[in-house]
Image (cartoon, coloured by chain):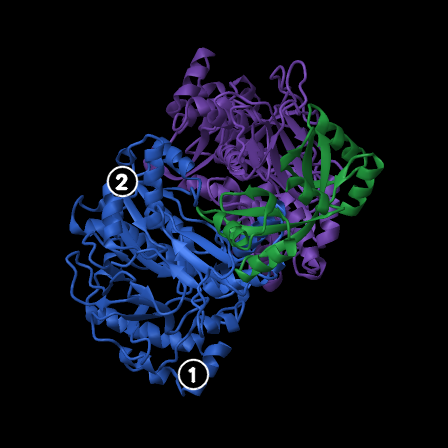
Chain colours: A green, B purple, C blue
Amino acid sequence: MKLQQLSLFLENRPGRLEAPLAAIAAEDINILTLSLADTAQFGILRLIVRDWEKAKRILEQDGWVVNVTEVVAVDVLDRPGGLAAALKILEDADLNIEYMYAYSLRRGDKAILIFRFEDPDRAVQVLLDKGLHVVGGEELISSTS
Amino acid sequence: MLRELWNDAEGGFHPASAPDFLPETALREVQLRRLRAVVARAYEHVELFRSRLDERGLTPDSIQQLEDIQRLPFTVKTDLRDTYPFGLFASPMSDVVRLHASSGTTGKPIVVAYTREDVEVWSEVMARTFAACGMHRGDILQNAFGYGLFTGGLGAHYGGETLGATVIPISGGNTDRQIMLIRDFQVSALCCTPSYFTHMVERARELGVDLRELPLKIGIFGAEPWTDGMRKHIEAEAGIKAYDIYGLSEITGPGVASECSTQEGLHIFEDHFYPEIIDPETGEALPDGEEGELVLTTLSKKAMPMIRYRTRDITSIITEPCACGRTIRRMRRIGRRSDDMFIIRGVNVFPSQIEAALLRVEGTLPHYQIILTRAHGLDQIAVEVEVTPEVFSDKIRGLEEVRKRLAQAIEHIIGIRVELRLVEPRTIARSEGKAKRVIDRRNEG
Amino acid sequence: MSLADRQPHSPADSIWNPTAETMPRAELEALQLERLRSLVERVAHVPFHRDHFAHHEIGTHSIRSLADIRRLPFTTKNDMRRHHPLGLLAVPRKDLARIHGSSGTTGKPTFVAYTARDLDIWSELCARFLVAGGLKPEHTVQVAFGYGLFTGGFGLHYGIEKVGAAVIPAAAGNTRRQIEIMRALDPEGLICTPSYALTIADAARDLGIDPRSLPIRLGHFGGEPWSEDMRREIEEELDISAFNNYGLSEIIGPGVSGECSARDGMHIQEDHFLVECLDPETLEPVPEGEPGELVITSLTREAMPMIRYRTRDIARLYREPCSCGRTTMRMSRVTGRTDDMLIIRGVNVFPSQIEEALLRVEGTTPHYLIEVSRPGTLDEVHVKVEIHPEIFSDRMDRMQSLCERISREIHTVAGIRAHVDLVEPRSIERFVGKAKRVLDKRNIQN
């Protein structure tokens, strides 16, 4: 149920974001979603792609430092309070979120959020127990194609 | 020969310590003579003082006996600010050899001046302080008080030199290096703020250095309040005797009073600094033994005499004679103050200074709270500021920028590093009446 | 004759110690020889010197003329480090009045010690060049040099005191506060590094204050190399006269030499220091006026005398008489170093110290570069560290704390605040053989 997310180290200067994206685009790998965290000096690009192993190989060949992290994608209702309800469940279960971002596409009345948990396995368990829909890799890919 | 005797004596004596042992009548005579001289000097040269005496129909001749000091007006901290910078000087600049400054309540520094003679007296009382704490010529003194405009560093430095010690002027900070020096140089005495030493003790343990096995035997701590619990901890952990000393830059800097080998109260060097205890509400003098605000008069200061300066420190005079043989009176350790000032790492800070800094950056005063903690023995100051829509920015670096600017503005005014935390709106408790701006958690746990 | 007795504006007005500073050459050289001979005698019991002397078969008899100094062996920074902390001490420890540090090539500083008499001489030497640069007893001087283990502020502090002027011991940093103090207390003099003088000017302008309206009229700057262009800039910006001085803590601290009103070279205080200028390769004297490495012997130091200390500083010496009337030899500005030491905001830093700091943070050493620049008036150090999988995390806080940790270690070891830039893999140029670890983009040569 967990997704493999790639993260890349980037210097925060013009044009740095384009290079890795172009590299994987050249190999026809589709980026499902991305998020960028930055400081004045550097940034971390986080990517979810269709074929993460291939993307990792390509990026590493190009000399990027790439990390693979397990993240969890969760469906929430795309209406006011939808996210809050999901967060409440996580809080009650004392699950620590290290960061999160929104998936770029919606599915009908649902939005997908990507979470990085300290303990992703327990998080998946809790979310399933509470009846939330955890979106797996295959499902994510098919829903966006 | 006499010098050797002094230096070898167990109790920590030094030729300069002689006035500590004056018979009381002789001491009172010296005090009265000096009091009359300093009042005359201030009357002649300091306009503010002269006009206050004139208003009361007093002249320097009104001082016929020591008790007459009670007829004189007080000097308060705001007098220094109102006459900033030179208004209380009683010497021309050509006689001034040193200027020090400490932070005042509005960000404007308080300036204090010394003639060559003043620096000599200051060096002497600091040498007497070190002697009272058991130091001798030949001791190696690591001076970890901060050097600069703050009087702690240079005061201790000159005192150590006068005593004949070897001074290592390391100043504050770089704890690993401090510990390395204590070890490599067989340092026998060290002075700094008590909180910084507690930090050193912790760091030494982390580095696997057992301070108890080193020659360090004497710790001289001051510039901030500390407890007997802290003393026991420091003494046990570092294998030293820890002494409390007292001073304030308005009076001279460190060297106003010091503990002796008995560690029971601080001897006031009252041949130079005349102490009174008053009721802080009424200003009435209180008899020896009663607790009240300490008021000090500099008996020999030339450049900037202070007459009946209200220290805001609460203490009492100990009436019993001391077992060490010193005849100069003792006061109890300072436990609290009569205003909202707090002391962190030896620096006096008023909440109003922090407000001034926040105002300068933000234009309006945000909700804020000052939190004092003690981590690894070192005092930490954190300022929490609620984020307002004006300062909010969606980029990490935008908020980071705001945080840095606020922190820098505060550091600029108070001169020490603060941790600035931006917090969400309405997370700082509001209260009716006076806001609780300072949360002091240093003595918790 | 006390200073106050002198005629105003007489040439002697700017000479603190006319006997020493205008001594006829023959007399001065005789004094130097006498002091050199007694120095050799005084240090003969110090194991380091004793072994050195024995090895070179040297005794007091070996020194018949000043030229015989060339028979004495050199002392280097390495010798000091090998004899950490005070192995070169020539007096009993109980006679020490002060211990200072000087930067070492690694995290361990080397130490220098002073007796009370050494301190007295040090104050005298600083008084001499301060007065040569126009300081008067009625002046007030702001000392914006750091006070502490390193000799920076202390020599000048005591020198000003000796002259009888007032000291404001402002110490380094907090520029706005420096300006506030300056405006409140009206000092005529300023003591700091030359680059910090320009920082003060810039900061004043940012506060809407015309730097030329600041009360200071003369400045004594040192602690880092600077150029004539920079002097012109400082004088123009602050409307002051700027004077250069030279010294190093291994020898005594500031006070080895300083400029007079002619500002044409720095007068060496030859009654206390014997200075040679040698080719660093052959160790032979260079022709007069040619650049070479300064090698200094401290003739009168008691606690820790140095014999032929190799300073690694490149400068020129010249002996033509000066218009000021002093008879002492002069030296040019320091124009370079014979080793890789950097001077950052007046702090001596060796690249090896930065490497040592990086070694303490796992995974940062294989590829790094120290970049020194002077974007405004102050030196900045950026340490670029290449990212690789071992130290990369997808979490922002971890990456930031990595930077902070490196920065903290650098501060502990080298005493400077460095910016740590994490950079992409392979962005730092690779070298065959010895890597180039330092890129100094400052332009401080003339």
What quarter of the picture does the C terminus of chain C occupy? bottom left
Q: CA distance from mark 1 to mark 2?
A: 51 Å
User: On what subunit does the disc labeled 1 rest?
Assistant: C
Say which residue label 2 marks. C238
Q: Nearer the viewer, residue A42 or B203?
A: A42
Q: Which mark is residue C53?
A: 1
* Mark count: 2
> What is the crowding at mark 1: few (fewer than 14 residues within 10 Å), some, or many (at least 20)?
some
Vertical placement of C116 versus A92: above or below?
below
Secondary structure of the residue carrying tag 1 is: helix
The dot on residue B66 is none
Amino acid type, residue under disc 1 in the picture: Phe
Tell me if residue C347 can be seen: no
Q: Chain of mark 2?
A: C
- Badge 2: few (under 14), some or many (20 or more) residues near its Cα, within 10 Å? many
Relative horizontal placement of residue C358, taking residue A85 as reference (left or right)? left
The answer to which of marks 1 and 2 sits earlier in the sequence is 1
Q: In front: A120, or B273?
A: A120
The residue at the point 46 percent across, 63 percent down is C351
Q: x, y (%) of residue C329?
A: 23, 65
Q: Are marks 1 and 2 on the same chain?
A: yes
Q: Position of residue B68 (x, y in %)?
A: 54, 20
Q: Secondary structure at mark 2?
A: helix
Which circle, 1 or 2, is nearer the viewer? Answer: 2
Q: Where is residue C317 drawn, in percent x and y?
A: 24, 67
Do tag 1 and tag 2 residues touch (Cβ < 8 Å)?
Answer: no
Q: Is residue B441 visible?
A: yes
Q: Is residue B185 above or below residue A26?
A: below
Q: Amino acid at mark 2?
A: Leu
Rendered image quadrant of residue B205: bottom right
Residue B232: % across, % down: 75, 45
